[in-house]
Image (tube, rainbow, N blue to C red):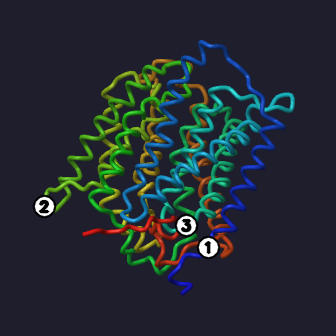
Amino acid sequence: MSQKLAPSIRISFPLLALILQCTIIVLFALFIDYRGEGPKKYIATYPVFQDVNTMVFLGFGFLATFLKRYGHSSIAFTMLLAAFALQWATIVEGLLFDFKNFKIQIRIISVIHADLSAVSALVAMGAVLGNTSPVQLLLMTILEVTCFTVNKWLLNILFQIDRKVSGMYLHLFGALFGLLVSRILYRPGLKNGHEKEGSFPISDLYSMIGTIFLWIFWPSFNAALLDMDREKAVFNTYYTMAACTVTVFAISSLFHNKGKIDMSHIRCATLAGGVAIGLSAPLIPSAFIAMLIGFSAGAISTLGMKYMKNALELYLDLHDTCGVLYTHGLPGIIGGITHVTLLSMPSVIEDSQRKTMYADYWPTAMLVTMAMSILSGIITGFILKLNIWKQPPDLKCYDDQAYWEYPHLVTTF
């Protein structure tokens, strides 16, 4: 029976969630202080915040609903983790960056930073979606947000890199963190696949709703933290994603033996361009350069999903439920390399001060970020592997009924 039913979380999950929420409320009461920036700054920034917020709760929530029997969990656990992550990120970010006179100064830009940290946690969640318990997901979120914020602080201390820029490493950090957690938690019983891990046409359709919301708002996402060149970042992101999307459709059809298009490629790889352009969006002076980045990211992401996903699981025991390596990881690496390349090309970057300032530090900063995400992911994986965290058995993975109350359906004839 123990192998057929998921372990009850009646005590462990409510206890953990309530303790964490009460702790955060106390910390807010002791340390949080609002700091207004004036109505002009607020009015100019609030629409961008709303765009990012829509991506976090609606875009990422629906994106994860492709699993045919895990829709409730995908969208609702996304909401749970985002709601917790943005609160916890406010505390951690505040202590490291905005702590003055024993108070954390909260501004509209602080809330955007918290939302971006939540996105990093949701990216990591995608790698282990369906084979972890809510208790594990909450603990993973605490550790991921903390480590991601500490990484931004380290880059600021070591290389004087502003967190508004280093924050765009959220895709690379979240993807590698989640993949290493997934590798440590890997179970041989799932090696040959799971009958519930696939999708239905309707679940693919719901997932595409998330993809479209993310696609629409991604220009705001890449420009949210910018004071200058926000317009350029929006335009570059928009054309990058457009070129990426066309490329993904073409590559998906080209490499199918019957010329058909794979919906999994469309829902994931069409977002790769937005990830790849993130660091460089405000720097690129011409749309065609941005489109080349989108073309490259779309092709690499699609081919990665086509040929790497099964091979990594077969030979490296690396399971990636949502394909975060191809939506966020590989495009994040492309974005980092593109950023370093652009900074070393004075003829491309218009701002001569920006193109030389700390340019030599960026390759090292990228390596530090990757090392930090890998190390913290391994440690987190071993913590989550402890039996006390109520990990579901193999038979109950990717199944909503392990954690959700379903209404009794009455059929009349």
* Type of amino acid at the residue the image marks with label 1: Ser
Q: Quadrant of residue 68?
A: bottom left
**Label 3 Cα crowd, 10 Å radius (few <14 / some 14-19 / many 20+):** many
* Type of amino acid at the residue the image marks with label 2: Lys
In percent of the image, x 59 and y 26: which residue is there? 357
The location of residue 398, given as percent across then percent down, is 45, 68
Quickly name the residue at label 1: 8
User: Which quadrant of the figure contains the C terminus?
Assistant: bottom left
- Give left or right: position of 293 versus 128: left
Quickly name the residue at label 3: 132
Q: Are marks 3 and 2 in contact (CB under 8 Å)?
A: no
Circle 3 or circle 2, nearest the eye: 3
The earlier-in-sequence mark between 1 and 2 is: 1
Cα separation, mark 1 vs mark 3, equals 13 Å
The location of residue 102, given as percent across then percent down, is 86, 32
The location of residue 330, given as percent across then percent down, is 43, 50
Circle 1 or circle 3, nearest the eye: 1
Cα separation, mark 1 vs mark 2, equals 46 Å
The disc placed on residue 203 is none
The earlier-in-sequence mark between 3 and 2 is: 3
Quickly name the residue at label 2: 258
* Type of amino acid at the residue the image marks with label 3: Thr
**Label 2 Cα crowd, 10 Å radius (few <14 / some 14-19 / many 20+):** few
The location of residue 29, given as percent across then percent down, is 81, 37
Q: Quadrant of residue 118?
A: top right
- Of all residues, the one furthest to the front in this rendering is 413
Q: Are marks 1 and 2 in contact (CB under 8 Å)?
A: no
Residue 391 vs residue 279, the one in the foreground = 391
Secondary element under disc 1, as helix, strand or loop, is loop
Q: Are marks 1 and 3 in contact (CB under 8 Å)?
A: no
